[in-house]
Image (spheres, grey):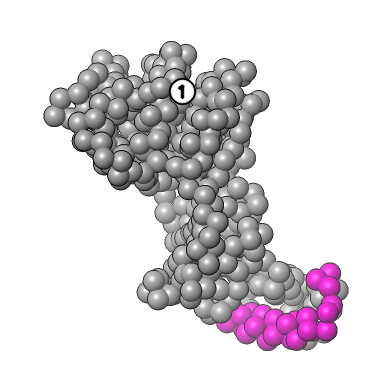
Amino acid sequence: MREQGVDEDVIGQIVTRLHSQLLEQAQDGSTSTNLATRLIEFVDRNAGSLSEQSRALITQRIIERTLGAGPLEALLRDPTVDEILVSGLAPVWVERAGRLIETAVQFESEDVLRLAIERLLAPAGRRVDEAEPLCDARLPDGSRINVALPPLAVDGPALSIRRFRPQGLTAAQLVESGSWTPQLADLLSEAVGARKNIMICGGTGSGKTTTLAAIAGLFAAHERIVTIEDTAELNLNLSHVVRLEGRPASIEGRGEVTIRRLLRNALRMRPDRIIVGEVRGAEALDMLAALSTGHDGSITTIHAGSPAEALARLETLALMAEVGLPHSAIREQVAAAIDLVVLQVRDASGARRITRVDQVVGIGEAVRTVELYSTDGPK
């Protein structure tokens, strides 16, 4: 915290002026360490009337702007922040404990914001520009970053960072926290032991990935697990895991590796269980074929608001493969491949929990299910 009486605008002006000088010094090939040392000395000389606390704050902000993610650095260091959401020069929002909160953090110019985006993407070997204004990537710590630039983002560059948790929650921890009931934990444990194929559905931010990781934590230690994701987020505390991650096409349109291709390759890797982080396209048909032909006990997630919607959407995605199968044949494959559908929700308080588990029992005009569990208790 800066001392009382020093206006924030004054701090900002000093930061901007000294940052410009730092950029000029960088042209002579100075190292980052030398620049930081020079900066501390320069701030001491030119802002000597301010307290040591304010000078340290100015120095830190300039270093963050020059070598890091600017005003986002403090949020990236905060372990209570689960997501960081930036929309142009408006105040930054964060998610803490399932709730969105507006912060006092904001970027002073679009140039500073774009520079921060470039630095965040650089370690992932990715970039965004007018030719390719969308980007989805994984940061070195496993966090997921998504960027949209103007003109697609109308109000300025939009940036979202979903923080990575080094250790996922276990089933026992979810029971202890009240997210799972003991009855639900027993049901899911029995399903894993019986090698049932499980599909987790829910909305964005409902906690599907957390639930997937917790269920996967119930796998036997000796089993070989292959995970397939667009952007790798899962970090399973298991001894034999192979992680596969898709790759988007380059700016020239080459080099794309789709989830569908990874899924087909995974079948040749001798998996005991397959985890598809999220099914969202034509790979649904390949997944259904794999799950119904010997790769049982696998898990996936899908965006949907109920088990019925999830199964219907899975049918639609499988039809996107355009292999000429009739709708009825796809529906039969869905009924044969999926055993349980788990509904994950985030309620008004921000709490994430499983509210329902359905078992697939057959087909009619739609895939038929029966409810095994709800928040009212097991059926």
Q: Nearer the viewer, residue 55 or 133?
A: 133
Q: Secondary structure at mark 1?
A: loop
From where the camera sits, is residue 372 visible? yes
Q: For mark 1, what is the residue?
A: 295
Relative image position of residue 170 (x, y in whole percent): 54, 27
Which residue is pictured at 73% across the width and 82% down the height? Answer: 23
Q: Specify the principal SS of the magenta part.
A: helix
Which of the 4 image quadrants contains residue 40?
bottom right
Residue 85 belongs to the span the image colors magenta:
no
Q: Residues within 10 Å of mark 1 (few under 14, many from 20)?
A: many
Q: Position of residue 240 (x, y in %)?
A: 64, 26
Q: Quadrant of residue 375?
A: top left
Disc 1 marks a residue whose amino acid type is His
Is residue 379 or residue 333 the one in the foreground? Answer: 333
Q: Quadrant of residue 101?
A: bottom left
Q: Which residues are magenta?
A: 7-33
Q: Position of residue 129 (x, y in %)?
A: 52, 73
Point 39% across, 71% down: residue: 152
**Number of callouts:** 1
